[in-house]
Image: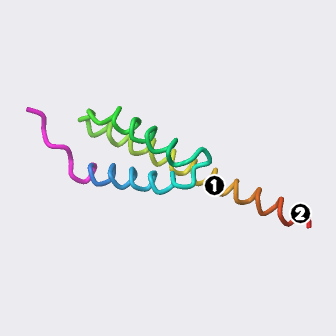
């Protein structure tokens, strides 16, 4: 019988999943594109039981979160620059 997962790790995984879902609302290809892929990515790692592997997965998800935020900031910067440089 497998051991129960660390509740703190479980909380962290759920939190990063919710953060990514929230960020996905503004994804350039749409939420309907983003959500199933996010769900599939998390479900692919759902069977992990090793704490080290789970922590690595959390770190990767955090990296992806930061990359998506950077994408949004870049998009916003380009939009503002285009709007005000041409004026």
Q: Is residue 4 above or below residue 69?
A: above
Q: Is residue 87 left or right of residue 12?
A: right
Image coordinates for residue 6, horizontal then vertical, percent: 21, 47
Q: How is the image coloured?
A: rainbow
Q: In what element is the residue under mark 2?
A: helix
* Residue shown at the point (76%, 59%) measured from the top left: 79
Q: Residue farthest to the right?
A: 87
Q: Residue at x 39, y 45 (%)?
A: 58
Q: Is residue 2 within the magenta segment? A: yes
Locate residue 62 relative to residue 87 in the image: left or right: left
Magenta segment's dominant SS is loop
- On the rendered image, what quadrant is the C terminus found in? bottom right
Task: Quote the CA–CA distance across marks 1 and 2.
Answer: 20 Å
Question: Which region shows up in magenta?
Answer: 1-9
Counting the numbered discs, the total is: 2
Return the residue at label 2.
85
Quadrant where the N terminus sits is: top left
Q: Position of residue 2 (x, y in %)?
A: 12, 34
């Amino acid at each position: 019988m497998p051991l129960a997962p660390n509740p703190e790790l479980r909380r962290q995984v759920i939190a990063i999943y919710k953060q990514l879902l929230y960020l996905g609302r503004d994804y350039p290809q749409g939420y309907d594109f983003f959500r199933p892929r996010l769900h599939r990515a998390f479900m692919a790692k759902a069977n992990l039981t090793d704490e080290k592997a789970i922590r690595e997965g959390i770190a990767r998800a955090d990296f992806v979160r930061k990359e998506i935020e950077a994408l949004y900031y870049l998009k916003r910067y380009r939009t503002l620059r285009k709007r005000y440089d041409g004026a």
